[in-house]
Image (cartoon, rainbow, N blue to C red):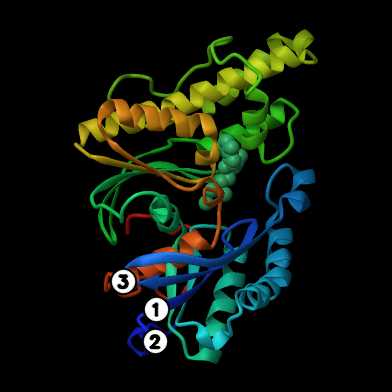
Amino acid sequence: MKTGDRGARAGNGNFLWLGIETSCDETGVALVEERAGRIRVVGALLTSQVNRHRPFGGVVPELAVREHARNLPLLVTRLLEEAGLRPQDLRGIAVTQGPGLASSLLVGNAYARALAASLDLPVFGINHLEGHLFSPFLEGDGPISFPFLGLIVSGGHTLLAAVEGWNRYRIVSATTDDAAGEALDKIARLLGLPYPGGPEIERLARQGDPKAFRFPRGFPEEGDLRFSFSGVKTAVRYFLEQHAERRSDPRFLADAAASLQESIIRTLCEKTLQAARQRSFRTVAASGGVVANRRLRQMLEEGCRDAGLCCRIAPSGLCTDNAVMIAAAAAWKHAAGIPPSLGTDIDPGLPLAL
Ligand code: AMP
Ligand code: MG
């Protein structure tokens, strides 16, 4: 993989990046322009494969790889066309190297390397989690402010990271079992809702009472920063068995959805605020698919405000997997003078803190 830098040759000081994200079941491409450390999103396209995977209740790797291979070249062509740009206008390519599904990552990386070779461009391998981590700074007031406490809540991850600077990340806490999004997806299935379950539960919860039922919370002791979401999933299973006769009552289902959502979200917010207090962080930055949840956004904002913390939350449309965050991470790092830190190989188990 090329790691050379043609930034100085861009001439007008602008640096146009193509971002590619194929770590799971979304094929994402994006163009971002970086100038003096500021990011402008030129365009972005995303094809979700949700409908292809829905009948199976989860992502089928074999299907995902075929969809990526079919869609990726078409999306890049369309993205450049819609932006009125040519491949020759690019100054760098950013691609997700991991973590994710090996076969899906391979499609994006092979394509990125081939395109970069044909255009003589540098390639930046980006950690998918690093993309999420900095996505809260794509919108809102002010630049990235180190240090910050990053909360990532997605279908595959739930973690808190201390972010001291570029490439200086430490895991403060992570889930000991299911990720929060994974638990929501599994619970939604128990409730008879389609995949992905998080948005479906949020929709149902809007009509329900979050105080109607109590569901257990993982590691509820004050100061224990560990996350656990398999307990609430099991509790919901037993709860639904116990109330089998009410399963067709819409009011009951809405109350159950609101109550279990509240249990998960309150845990996420309280542990984040506790970690910020324990480690004396002034800024909290939240990202990942579950952060699209409006109740979570509201609760975290209020909690931060009460605690006197600066709260940055990823734009709703950029919470789930996307290529804007991948291109932006590469652009920011490049602007900060950080050389590409990842090698040429994909790494399905790539950790955030190396
Ligand atoms: P990601 O892994 O970052 O692509 O995020 C996907 C996960 O986010 C899945 O588990 C979804 O169920 C979850 N998710 C997406 N939107 C919402 C939402 N509005 N509320 C809760 N969870 C959500
Ligand atoms: Mg993700």
- For the residues bearing labels 2 and 3, Cβ distance under 8 angstroms: no
Image coordinates for residue 253, horizontal then vertical, percent:
70, 17
Residue type beneath disc 3: Ala
Q: Quadrant of the N terminus?
A: bottom left
Vertical comparison of 118 with 177: above or below? below
Image coordinates for residue 247, horizontal then vertical, percent:
77, 15
- For the residues bearing labels 2 and 1, Cβ distance under 8 angstroms: yes
**Is residue 150 rendered to the left or right of residue 297?**
left
In the image, what residue occupies the spot 45% across and 82% down? 91
Graded by Cα atoms within 10 Å as few (under 14), some (14 to 19) or many (20 or more), the crowding at tag 3 reads few
Residue at image mark 3: 36
Q: Quadrant of the C terminus?
A: bottom left
Q: Looking at mark 2, is its residue's CB closer than 8 Å to ligand 2?
A: no
- For the residues bearing labels 3 and 1, Cβ distance under 8 angstroms: no
**Is residue 166 rendered to the left or right of residue 69?**
left
Residue at the farthest left position: 280
Residue at image mark 2: 10
Vertical comparison of 104 with 188: above or below? below
Image coordinates for residue 119, horizontal then vertical, percent:
52, 90
Q: Judge whether residue 354 can be spotted in this image.
A: yes
Q: Nearer the viewer, residue 329 or 117?
A: 329
Answer with mark 2 or mark 3, whichever residue precedes in sequence.
2
Image coordinates for residue 241, horizontal then vertical, percent:
71, 14
- Give the Cα separation between the discs numbered 3 and 1: 8 Å
Q: Nearer the viewer, residue 177 or 157?
A: 157
Graded by Cα atoms within 10 Å as few (under 14), some (14 to 19) or many (20 or more), the crowding at tag 2 reads few
- Give the Cα separation between the discs numbered 2 and 1: 7 Å
Q: Quadrant of residue 103?
A: bottom right
Residue at image mark 1: 14
Q: Nearer the viewer, residue 295 or 116?
A: 295
- Give the Cα separation between the discs numbered 2 and 3: 13 Å
In the image, what residue occupies the spot 80% across and 15% down? 248
